[in-house]
Image: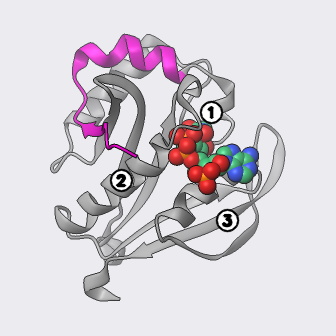
Amino acid sequence: MENTIQLRPFKSSDAQRLASIANNANISDNLRDGFPHPYTLEHASQFISRTLSADPISIFAIEKDGEHVGNIGLHPESDIYSRTAELGYFVGEDYWGKGIGTEAVRQIVQYGFETMNLIRIHAGVFEYNRGSMRILEKNGFLKEGVSRKRVVKNGKVLDEHQYSIINPKYA
Ligand SMILES: CC(C)(COP(=O)(O)OP(=O)(O)OC[C@H]1O[C@@H](n2cnc3c(N)ncnc32)[C@H](O)[C@@H]1OP(=O)(O)O)[C@@H](O)C(=O)NCCC(=O)NCCS
């Protein structure tokens, strides 16, 4: 597939668009409760300011053909886990099934290893989210195991599948 997907830092002017693609229960049902539903313009503005205060920036807008279609980010951990980051992402529902999530993960893993010098990137996926598991597997993540009944989401108790990838320099 031709690579027309780019990760770029957010701009304050992205707030309206972010609120419109993020305000969707089919997205928030797969994410932590910190990703609200409904997702308002104020949530979007606050989120964008937070992403811009990080150094280096590690949360990006996913752009396809110049249009903002989703978010992806690495969340570095601290203390003894400082060379590890957690990966999170979503793609606006109108754009699902076009390979965007897969390509965005490929690009951010490269950024995490080459620019942030991370050793490990990991992600937790709710038991019903086969698409996200597939994206991680296609990008070389390994399933390390299943954290049983770790999640309560929308009142449902769920297993969480744990995926990771290791920087080849440290493998
Ligand atoms: C998960 C998500 C990012 C996928 O984005 P996307 O751009 O549609 O993903 P892609 O098109 O790159 O690839 C999806 C892959 O999963 C597969 N897939 C999608 N839904 C599936 C399902 N229900 N069962 C099995 N496979 C599925 C697709 O067939 C594709 O694999 P293929 O290339 O081998 O055919 C998107 O649906 C989303 O934002 N969901 C809500 C938020 C979310 O789940 N975030 C991740 C939390 S861990």
Q: Secondary structure at mark 2?
A: strand
Task: Write down the residue under mark 1.
Answer: 28
Image location of residue 103, percent across then percent down: 40, 49
Amino acid type shown at disc 1: Ser
Task: Write down the residue under mark 3.
Answer: 161
Marks 2/3 in contact by CB < 8 Å: the verdict is no
Q: Which mark is residue 74?
A: 2
- The image quadrant of residue 43 is top left
Relative height, residue 129 to residue 112 (above, below): above
Q: Does the closest atom of ligand 1 sit within 8 Å of the Cβ of label 1? A: yes
Mark 2 Cα shell of 10 Å, populated few (<14), some (14-19), many (≥20): many
Amino acid type shown at disc 3: His
Q: Which mark is residue 122?
A: none
Mark 1 Cα shell of 10 Å, populated few (<14), some (14-19), many (≥20): many
Image location of residue 140, percent across then percent down: 48, 71
Return the residue nearer the eye: 131 or 123: 131
Precedes in sequence: disc 2 or disc 3: 2
Precedes in sequence: disc 1 or disc 3: 1
Precedes in sequence: disc 1 or disc 2: 1
Left or right of 58? Residue 165 is right
Amino acid type shown at disc 2: Leu
Q: Quadrant of the C terminus?
A: bottom left
Left or right of 166? Residue 138 is right
Q: Residue at x 30, y 18 (%)?
A: 14
Farthest residue, direction right: 156
Can residue 68 be seen in this snapshot? yes
Q: Residue at x 24, y 58 (%)?
A: 111
Q: Residue at x 50, y 44 (%)?
A: 99
